[in-house]
Image: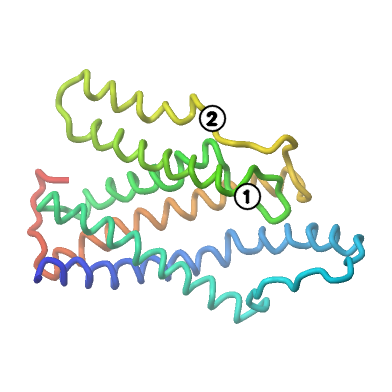
Amino acid sequence: MKAFNTILLTALLAGGLAGLVLGGVQQITVVPLILEAETYETGGAEEEEAAPGDEEEAWAPDDGVERTLWTVLNSMLVGIGFGLLLTACYALRGKITWQGGILWGLAGFAVFNLAPSLGLPPELPGDAAAGLEQRQVWWILTAAVTAVGLWIIAFQPKPYLKLFGVALLVLPHLFGAPHPETHGGLAPDELRDSYIVATLVTNAVFWILLGVFCALFYRHFGGTTEDPSVA
């Protein structure tokens, strides 16, 4: 019970703090690009007349303070969720250093952001995309296979197993991600490229901070003792 409470408290504090930083950084790096892309989407939509009986649009927070608060809150919830997963990994390892937390954070970034983005780059509003269900299945399988592959490479000593881990990293990209028949979108390619880079860099910072924060808080609450020989 104590171990569970330690994991939960660590995830709440470390994940919430890392998510708060993520939400703040996104306001500077990512959100302005989304807002700019929405101007192209809105401009295209205004040219089409609304058909009678169309369904009402789904609720969305108003631009400004409300949208910012919802973005930051969502980032904090995401941070707590990933913090639970990361701290559970620390508990299984038994010991963790803050330096090791950086490596674990980079691994999390590779699993949940970098590897999936190689096939399904972050999308701007108005971008063409394949079916949602197809994309979700490919994303989940890619993240799962990448996690297993990295675990094998990191913790299995035998060379042939490490080669198998590398093969797992490549496997989902050999099959390829689902893509629409027509590529691109309403926003210019330059804006899309900037958005992809900003999203990946921002998430890399988030994962590194999450790895370090989780290691420090987990140690602080008695979940582990620092051991330089253990990552």
Q: Residues within 10 Å of mark 2 (few under 14, many from 20)?
A: few
Label annotation for residue 176: 2
Mark 1: amino acid: Glu
Q: Judge left or right: residue 181 versus residue 18.
A: right
Rendering colour mode: rainbow
Mark 2: amino acid: Gly
Q: Residue furthest top?
A: 160
Vertical order, 213 against 58 (above or below): above
> Measuring 56% from the left and 52% from the top, which residue is drawn there?
198
Vertical order, 186 against 23 (above or below): above
Q: Judge left or right: residue 166 versus residue 24.
A: left
x then y, percent, for residue 149: 30, 33
Q: Quadrant of residue 38?
A: bottom right
Q: Judge left or right: residue 156 versus residue 56.
A: left
Vertical order, 57 against 145 (above or below): below
x then y, percent, for residue 3: 11, 66
x then y, percent, for residue 189: 73, 43
Judging depth in this view, the residue of 97 and 147 nearest the camera is 147
> Measuring 23% from the left and 32% from the top, which residue is drawn there?
152
The residues bearing labels 1 and 2 have C-alpha atoms spaced at a distance of: 17 Å
> Measuring 66% from the left and 53% from the top, which residue is drawn there?
124
Judging depth in this view, the residue of 52 and 161 nearest the camera is 52
Judging depth in this view, the residue of 55 and 146 nearest the camera is 55
Q: Residues within 10 Å of mark 1 (few under 14, many from 20)?
A: some
x then y, percent, for residue 65: 61, 81
Q: Which residue is mark 1?
A: 123
